[in-house]
Amino acid sequence: MKQRIAFTLMMSFVLSSLMSCWVTFINLGYSDQFLHNWGRAFILAWPAAAVIAFVFGPRIQRWSMRFK
C-alpha cells in the first residue's frame, strides 16, 4: 500500500505540474503573472489528480494488462 500511495503522489505531481503548465500557457499565454497563475492552477489540480489516480489507477492498470 505504501508503494501505491507513493507512486500515486509522484505520478499525480508530475502530471499535474506539466498539464497545469500547458493549460495555463494555452489559456493565458506567457506574462509576468505566469508563474503565479501556474502555481494556482497546480495547487488546485494536484489534490484532484491524486485522488483520481488513487481511485481509478488499479482499474486502469487491470484494463491495460489486457494488451499483453
Image (tube, rainbow, N blue to C red):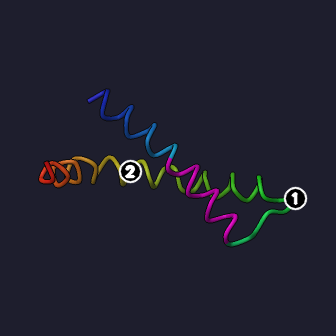
Q: Label the magenta part by its dominant secondary structure.
A: helix
Classify mark 2: helix, strand or loop: helix
Please name the amino acid that badge 1 sits on: Asp
> Crowding near pointer 2: few (<14 within 10 Å), some, many (20+)?
some
**For this view, does 33 lie left or right of residue 62?**
right
Where is residue 18? Give x, y as percent. Answer: 57, 52
Residue 37 occupies which quadrant of the picture? bottom right
Image mark count: 2
Q: Return the residue found at the far top.
A: 2
First of labels 1, 2 by sequence position:
1
Please name the amino acid that badge 2 sits on: Val
Q: Return the residue found at the far front.
A: 68
Residue ID at (28%, 49%): 57
Name the residue tied to disc 1: 32
Q: Are the two marked residues, 1 and 2, in contact with CB atoms closer than 8 angstroms?
A: no
Residue ID at (52%, 44%): 14
The residue segment tinted magenta is 15-26
